[in-house]
Image: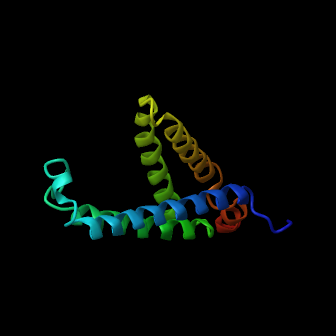
Amino acid sequence: MNGHRKGGGWIAFAGVLLILSGINTFVNGLWALNASETIKDSFEDTLLFSDKNLDTWGWIYVVVGIVVVAAGVAIFSRAQWARWVGIVVASIGAISAFFWLFNPNFWVPALVSVTLNVLVLHALISYGDRDEVTHRLSQPIR
């Protein structure tokens, strides 16, 4: 064996995209925490939770961002919990971006987002499982 793991490039791609996505989500959460009081009139009666300020959404985004960054880093070691976090995050991302395809102003970025999420799903589903060698070593000797 040459020391390379099958699908290593795809796993690296998925890990890097998850890290970038997590950082983006984290930064958006920090923005929401910082801008909560200054723009609260703009969001009044429009948010699902806490329509008086953005603090609730800010903390949700900060926590989710940290989890996604941790999953992105753990993807490189092919941790199964990280694989499943990545699959859930990429699925939600693809589905939510899909609805923007019908907006004439945002169809290009939505198409890019759907494509990247589907590629991450492909990477994690096809190559994110443990190696066959690992599976064979865990089998009882007959």
46 or 14: nearer the viewer: 46
Which quadrant of the figure contains the N terminus? Answer: bottom right
Q: Residue at x 63, y 61 (%)?
A: 130
Q: Quadrant of residue 52?
A: bottom left
Asked whether, in this view, residue 128 is left or right of residue 34, the answer is right
Asked whether, in this view, residue 28 is left or right of residue 43, the answer is right
Q: Quadrant of residue 25?
A: bottom left
Q: Position of residue 8 (x, y in %)?
A: 72, 60
Circle count: 0
In the rendered image, is residue 79 in sight? no
Q: Residue at x 70, y 63 (%)?
A: 136
Q: How is the image coloured?
A: rainbow
40 or 15: nearer the viewer: 40
Asked whether, in this view, residue 52 is left or right of residue 134, the answer is left
121 or 46: nearer the viewer: 46
In the rendered image, is residue 122 in sight? yes
Q: Residue at x 42, y 70 (%)?
A: 66
Q: Position of residue 90 (x, y in %)?
A: 49, 50
Q: Position of residue 106 (x, y in %)?
A: 46, 37
Q: Position of residue 108 (x, y in %)?
A: 53, 37
